[in-house]
């Protein structure tokens, strides 16, 4: 077997491992199936994908693709997080946070180097959507059985889904992807039915979480998708059906909790956010450039919180969290990364062949970032996977445009045009 064939095999295996990671990220089998717990499947699958990708690049003497300014910004951001051990108020936590952020950066780089075709992009999105059914069933079952409900009525699940707010924003992320496949006739009736089920169950999970931020993020995501989708009437009908189902089947407790937005001074959860934002503001005034160190926001709480805020919270806003922990230098790097990925998804949505999926990714990103205005989770694998998929969509669409321009400049040979599966062109 030649070096080229070995490289292609490694690339394919890396894609399989990456798709498995996307599924494990939602199904989290290690959290509820004891035999899988010691395997650390998320780390295993992502590590295999990254390792095979690196071997393929080394074997064929190909440079690693770093994704331009947004990829460079993420690398520097991760380096800054690790370097913040030097000035952190809690160096041990900062060291752990820095290591985790480096792992998430590696996942992002693996995605943009492996997801190089429209087919691969679609398959990975499908894996996330279908695996989310497992999470939704877990959340719904816990609510039905009354298992470990937060505040006595807010449902959640295991692992990263143990926080109702975190669970809700991660479920909101897959809804636009699911409805995009559902609305597309070319998907086939089996896949469309499965995606429709995934979308419905995800919305139910968000409702049962009673997460106000998750509900707002989902609403924004679906609005962006419906507005930008070319089959607008069909998109509006699908969105209206989801809204109608929400209105009809949401429990009374869901509406009561959302009504507390207008009386947040009487809501302990809402006031926790207000106190957290005050802490972030005071940190930024004291240490504006570099913050208190990655992961150290809660440990800096006693130094900056008002006297009445006796309980330490997370920042409840990813941008304020970055300002508090890594200062405005970190915020600038994070904005370049996040803005570049988001802008790339919206640009890719203009692509004639892959635009339908890129529009769903753009909607998911819009909703996710809105959720992040109420939740501060720098170490969220879902964020880096979503942004990686958006960056990949941008790269694939851009490569197709460049290829098209080259073809247009080539002299006509008289041969008929060749066709390929939608989005199958390999990104340069």
Image: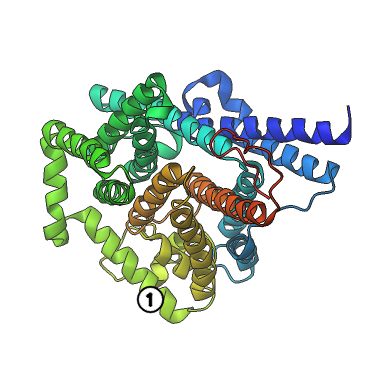
Q: Is residue 39 above or below residue 389?
A: above
Residue 405 in the image: above or below residue 121:
below
Residue in view at x 51 percent, y 35 percent? 122
Judging depth in this view, the residue of 121 and 200 nearest the camera is 121
Percent coordinates x, y for residue 422 in the rendering:
53, 36
Q: Position of residue 231 (x, y in %)?
A: 30, 42
- Which of the colour schemes (rainbow, by chain, secondary structure, one colour) is used? rainbow
**Residue 44 in sight here:** yes
Question: Left or right of 241: which side holds 313?
Answer: right
Residue 121, compared with residue 134, is above or below; it is: below
Number of callouts = 1
Q: Which residue is mark 1?
A: 282
Give residue 218's position: percent from left, percent from top. 29, 46
Q: Quadrant of the N terminus?
A: top right
Residue 55: quarter of image? top right
Mark 1 neighbour class, 10 Å CA radius: few under 14, some 14 to 19, many 20 or more: some
Write down the quadrant of residue 188 in the picture.
top left
Q: Quadrant of residue 83?
A: bottom right
Q: Is residue 149 above or below residue 32?
A: below
Nearest the eye: 270 or 126: 126
Query: Percent from the top left, x then y, of residue 172?
Result: 34, 42
């Amino acid at each position: 077997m030649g070096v080229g064939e070995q490289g292609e095999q490694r690339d394919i295996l890396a894609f399989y491992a990456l798709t498995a990671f996307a599924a494990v990220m939602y199904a989290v089998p290690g959290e509820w199936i004891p035999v899988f717990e010691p395997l650390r499947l998320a780390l295993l699958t992502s590590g295999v994908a990254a390792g095979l990708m690196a071997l393929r690049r080394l074997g064929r003497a190909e440079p690693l693709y770093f994704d331009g300014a947004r990829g460079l910004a993420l690398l520097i951001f991760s380096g800054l997080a690790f370097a913040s051990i030097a000035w952190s108020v809690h160096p041990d936590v900062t060291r752990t946070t820095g290591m985790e952020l480096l792992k998430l950066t590696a996942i992002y780089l693996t995605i943009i180097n492996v997801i190089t075709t429209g087919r691969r992009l679609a398959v990975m999105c499908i894996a996330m959507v279908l695996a989310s059914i497992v999470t939704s069933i877990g959340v719904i079952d816990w609510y039905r059985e009354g298992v470990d409900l937060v505040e006595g009525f807010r449902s959640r699940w295991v692992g990263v889904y143990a926080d109702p707010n975190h669970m809700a924003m991660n479920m909101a992320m897959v809804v636009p992807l699911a409805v995009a496949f559902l609305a597309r006739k070319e998907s086939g009736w089996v896949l469309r039915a499965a995606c429709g089920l995934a979308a419905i169950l995800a919305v139910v999970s968000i409702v049962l979480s009673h997460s106000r931020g998750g509900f707002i993020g989902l609403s924004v995501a679906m609005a962006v998708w419906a507005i930008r989708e070319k089959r607008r009437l069909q998109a509006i009908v699908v969105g209206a059906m989801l809204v109608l189902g929400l209105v009809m089947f949401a429990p009374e407790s869901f509406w009561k909790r959302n009504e507390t937005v207008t009386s947040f001074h009487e809501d302990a959860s809402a006031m926790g956010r207000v106190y957290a934002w005050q802490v972030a503001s005071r940190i930024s005034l004291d240490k504006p450039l570099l913050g208190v160190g990655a992961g150290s926001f809660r440990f800096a709480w006693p130094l900056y919180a008002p006297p009445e805020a006796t309980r330490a919270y997370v920042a409840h806003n990813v941008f304020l969290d970055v300002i508090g922990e890594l200062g405005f230098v970190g915020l600038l790097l994070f904005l370049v990364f996040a803005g570049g990925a988001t802008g790339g998804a919206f640009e890719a949505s203009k692509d004639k062949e892959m635009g339908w999926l890129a529009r769903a990714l753009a909607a998911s990103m819009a909703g996710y970032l809105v959720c992040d205005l109420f939740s501060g989770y720098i170490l969220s694998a879902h964020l880096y996977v979503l942004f990686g998929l958006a960056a990949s969509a941008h790269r694939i669409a851009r490569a197709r445009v460049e290829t098209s321009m080259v073809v247009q400049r080539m002299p006509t040979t008289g041969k008929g045009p060749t066709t390929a599966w939608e989005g199958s062109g390999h990104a340069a």
